[in-house]
Amino acid sequence: MKYVFFGTPDFASIILKDLITRGYAPLAVVTNPDRPVGRKQVITPSPVKTLALENGIKVLTPGSLKGEEIQKELEAIGADIFILAAYGKIIPGPVLEIPQNGVVCVHPSLLPKLRGATPVQNAILQGFKETGVTLFQMDKEIDHGPILLQEKTEIRAEENTESLLERLAGVSARMVAELLDNFSKLEPIPQNHAEATFTRKLETSDAFIEEINLQRAETGGGEITYILDRKIHAFYPEPGAWTMRDGKRVKLLDSEVIDGKLRLKVIQIEGKKPQAI
């Protein structure tokens, strides 16, 4: 099947790279416009755009998909299906109707659990033992459409959001290839909406850990030890779990639990580079 790939961050670029390697290059990619990055606010293309250009793939970077011009351009490409993975913008109804086989979204959770913006972070935060990837047919509601493919995987104790997302991206690419080969054979299964749970975008304030709770965890504070360990893993790499010590902000970048006690492994004191401890 001929497809257009919609995606923006590293998670999407890992999927796209794997698909290209497998021989499933898209007709075009749609990604967010270049944006300022870092302290110097250097205008930077998205990881998906960079990868697409390196592979000679047509790139579209609309600020919105609501305009008639971009919708006509997408229609003119002549794709059988659109594949979306962490695109980062709303897909309006007219775009959902352009390809004859609709739009399939890659979502890194076992839907209907953990719908929304931060499924991987929340799977770690909530102490899930397993998560997975769901490919579903998009409709006008968020993460709501019928499931086409779903695969489970365990969450390892040492995994953080970055490493788990990378692993789920590899699973996703394999599943997308399977979907492209076997779409006509797949039977959509409606989600059980009564079991749906939802996530929201996480803020820097959500990653704050009070020093008193950190001290309790480091000396063996029962459940708080495991809660904080999960929080440190869930908020890596961004924004990074953090606390205040001696008037300075300290990022808590890695940890482990040994004999019921939290052990910080990597920290970053304000104004300094990360350091192992």
Image (cartoon, rainbow, N blue to C red):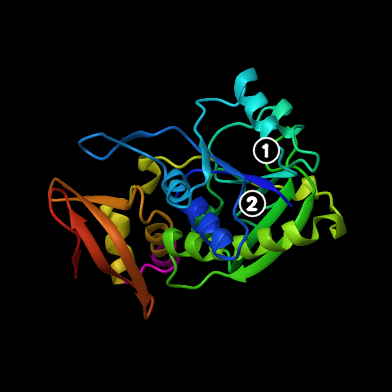
Q: Is residue 119 left or right of residue 179?
A: left
Residue 176 lies left or right of residue 42; in this view the side is right
Image: magenta residue range: 220-227
19 shown above or below 257: above
Label 1 with label 2: CB-CB less than 8 Å: no
At a point 42% along the width and 72% down the height, the residue shown is: 158
Horizontal side of 26 relative to 236 (left or right) equals right
Q: Which residue is mark 2?
A: 106
Amino acid type at mark 1: Ile
Main SS category, magenta section: helix
Q: Quadrant of the C terminus?
A: bottom left
Residue 142 got which mark?
A: 1
Local secondary structure at mark 1: loop
Dot 2, how many residues are within 10 Å of its Cα: few (below 14), some (14-19), or many (20+)?
A: many
Seen at 80% across and 39% down, the residue is 100
Q: Nearer the viewer, residue 192 or 58?
A: 58
| 95 and 113: which is toward the camera | 95
At x 68% / y 56%, what residue is drawn?
A: 134
User: For mark 1, does the 10 Å Cα neighbourhood hold few (<14), some (14 to 19), or many (20 or more) residues?
Assistant: few
* Residue 87 percent across, percent down from the top left: 55, 41
Label 2 sits on a secondary structure element that is strand
Residue 78 position (above or below residue 261): above
Three-letter amino acid code at the position of disc 2? Val
Where is residue 153? Give x, y as percent. Answer: 61, 70
Viewer-side label of 1, 2: 2
